[in-house]
Image (cartoon, grey):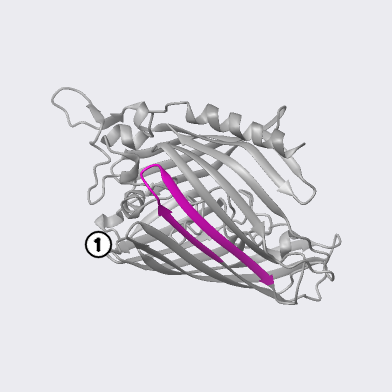
Amino acid sequence: MTFNKVLCGLLVSMFFVLSTNVYAVSQWSRKYGVSCTTCHTPAFPRLNYKGEKFQLNGYQDVGKQDGDTTGKQAIGKEGAPKRLFIDELQNFFGVRLNVVPVKVQWPGTRVNFGNPNWAQFFTAGSIFKNVSIWIETELTTTSPSAAALKHAWFRMGFHNLFDTQLLNMWVGVLDPLELHATSGRLPMIPAIEQEVFRVQSSGGNGEDSVDLRGGKPAIVLYGSSGAFVYSVGIDNGKALSDVNTSKNYFGTLKAQVTDGAFEGSAVSLFGYTGKDTKWITSTTLAENNFWRISPAVNLRWNDWDMLAAFVYGSDSNWTIATNAGDKKTFYGMMLQAGYPLSDEFYAAAQYDGVWLSDGPTTSDISKIGFALSYQPRENWRIMLVPRADILPVNTTTHTKASHDFQVMIRTMF
């Protein structure tokens, strides 16, 4: 594959995309008659401060509990109290698409075209006052003839319990980092993984190895009071069936700015602990007790959106190959910044670094990425995303640099 062919494919893809007008928007824009940027930053799907409050309030208008009324029809017998309130179906359903027309990786140049990646059909909103749902049913594809259908996220919420914002509950497949001061489940640059949150317990070798990101069957209690937010949760690990009968526990404390030039800026502390296991023989079970701690900060000012997160982790038995134990620690960071160049263009950059405690290893990461987005509509985003490996080539561990460039298209309607 020559560079000219790659460039030709790229130009054809971009011409097709940019010549298409998209006017549809997602369900809450339809329901409340507002712009996407009411709740999202220009770098959607990332939420702004109002969007975060709307989510915490059970997809009810901020400062209200209108889940029984807005957009709904009251049904019942004439003269009797109304006990059924039905929303318009279009206020519950939305679609998101993610397509990668071109991806190039090098050294050993590999060029891939036409990756449909995934389509998400999401059902979300308030069932009635202070009860909400969020379900993302995701259709992913690994080849033209192979696809998988799954619930990427599945969450039922119970809000303002006992008429206080201090007590709310989510139940379902959840993200433990949901209330951390990073971009979390709805990132600023969805084309780039936040590597430090992807480090798995036991190096991924256990029967219940987990990272900090991604959906986990869990229950979370959370609350907010002005500038302060908290959450505590318990999860099963990576599966709906509890593999090793041990639970994982997590929690977040966050302080945030509620108004003024720095509205939405926040600092938080997140912690996670649990146990991973693996049967070495039919009678020998190896265990790995692990914990993670992560401080993070988000600075929002004059359209700037800047994030920094640090993670320190410890595993009592990283290799989980024997009961002798192989204690290992790691640390890492994620730095991210974004700024709207205009109503249509958004620029962002991200750095990811992860280092294990016992010197250079093949698991170490040091990468920098950039994203330039063009948004002809608020719900249509085209990204050019180069990413470079800046970790020096190490002859001891035989690690080599790896770089990539991709075009990603995301839309929601």
| In magenta stretch: residue 336 | yes
Q: Kindly state the secondary structure of the residue where label 1 is placed.
A: loop
Other-residue count near label 1 (Cα within 10 Å), few / some / many at <14 / 14–19 / ≥20: few
Q: Is residue 326 above or below residue 13?
A: below
Residue 57 relative to residue 108: left or right: left
Task: List the single residue furthest toward the left.
Answer: 79
Residue 280 relative to residue 376: left or right: right
Task: List the single residue furthest toward the front.
Answer: 4
Residue 240 coordinates in the image, percent (x, y)? 61, 48
Name the residue beneath numbered marker 1. Answer: 259
Residue found at x 85% / y 59%:
282
Instruction: Magenta stretch: give its range.
Output: 334-355
- Among the 4 quarters of the image, the one containing residue 195: bottom right
Residue 220 coordinates in the image, percent (x, y)? 45, 57
| In magenta stretch: residue 262 | no
Task: List the single residue furthest toward the top.
Answer: 78
